[in-house]
């Protein structure tokens, strides 16, 4: 009977940030800089006859809460907002805060504490050695997944060390 033979060693790694990324604007600026400047030296490639960029965004989401407090500042309810775009997130927060009928129904005053928001963006990258790997940014961590070559992790680690907010 035949045995399975290992063909690859796929790895993952996580970098926990000392401090959370301050806000959505800072987070989006970081992601946009990576997409525009390709700091990891990724290369363009072709997949199923389609030309692909060296680094591409494959998913993202933004989550936050609008809380409702009574006259004694006690939380009496909340609405969770989750959107797949910055504009969708900001619009949903603004509309929820401004919704008089919802404020009346919740019987409290609405507020949004952006320090509790969470963000996530996953980038797919093509290394010059032909490997495809993913880097997921969250407000408090960076995850590297589906890589084999240790040089990919080393390269990402060196880059992150040079970015103050990623310490």
Image (tube, rainbow, N blue to C red):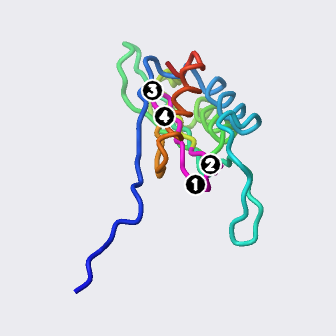
Q: Which mark is residue 127?
A: 2
Labels 2 and 1: the sequence-earlier one: 2
What numbered label is drawn on residue 132? 1
Of the image marks 2 and 4, the number of the one nearer the N terminus: 2
Q: CA distance from mark 4 to mark 3?
A: 32 Å
Q: Residue furthest bottom?
A: 1
Give the structural element (helix, strand or loop) at label 3: strand
Depth check, mark 1 against mark 4: the one in front is 1
Instruction: Tell me what residue is drawn at x 56 percent, y 33 percent.
Output: 155
Q: Identify the residue under disc 3.
A: 68
Q: Look at 41% across and 15% down and name the residue there.
A: 71
For the residues bearing labels 2 and 1, Cβ distance under 8 angstroms: yes
Specify whether 104 is left or right of 27: left
- 1 or 3: tag closer to the N-terminus: 3
Q: What is the spatial separation of the Cα atoms under label 1 and label 4, in whole angstroms? A: 17 Å
Name which of mark 4 and mark 3 comes first in the sequence: 3
Disc 1 or 4, which lies upstream in sequence? 1
- Mark 2–mark 4 Cα distance, whole angstroms, equals 18 Å
Q: Which residues are magenta?
A: 122-141
Q: Nearer the viewer, mark 2 or mark 3?
A: 2
Q: Nearest the camera: 136 or 4? A: 4
Disc 1 on helix, strand or loop?
strand
* Contact check, label 1 and label 3, Cβ < 8 Å: no
Q: Nearer the viewer, residue 36 or 151?
A: 151
* Residue corresponding to mark 4: 142
Task: Rate crowding at label 2 as few (under 14), some (14 to 19) or many (20 or more) other CA atoms within 10 Å.
Answer: many
Tag 2, which secondary structure?
A: loop
Q: Is residue 11 magenta?
A: no
Image coordinates of residue 109 in percent, x first then y, are 49, 22
């Amino acid at each position: 009977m035949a045995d399975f033979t290992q063909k690859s060693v796929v790895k993952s790694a996580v970098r926990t940030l000392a401090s959370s990324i301050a806000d959505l604007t800072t987070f989006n600026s970081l992601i946009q800089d990576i997409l525009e400047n390709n700091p990891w030296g990724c290369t363009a490639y072709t997949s199923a006859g389609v030309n692909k960029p060296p680094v591409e965004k494959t998913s993202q989401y933004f989550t936050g809460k609008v809380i409702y407090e009574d006259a004694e500042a006690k939380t009496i309810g909340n609405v969770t907002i989750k959107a797949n775009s910055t504009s969708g997130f900001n619009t949903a927060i603004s509309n929820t805060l401004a919704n008089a009928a919802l404020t009346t129904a919740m019987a409290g005053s609405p507020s949004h504490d952006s320090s509790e928001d969470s963000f996530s963006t996953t980038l797919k990258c093509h290394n010059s050695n032909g490997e495809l790997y993913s880097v997921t940014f969250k407000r408090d961590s960076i995850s590297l997944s589906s890589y084999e070559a240790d040089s990919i992790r080393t390269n990402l680690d060196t880059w992150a060390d040079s970015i103050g907010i990623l310490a």
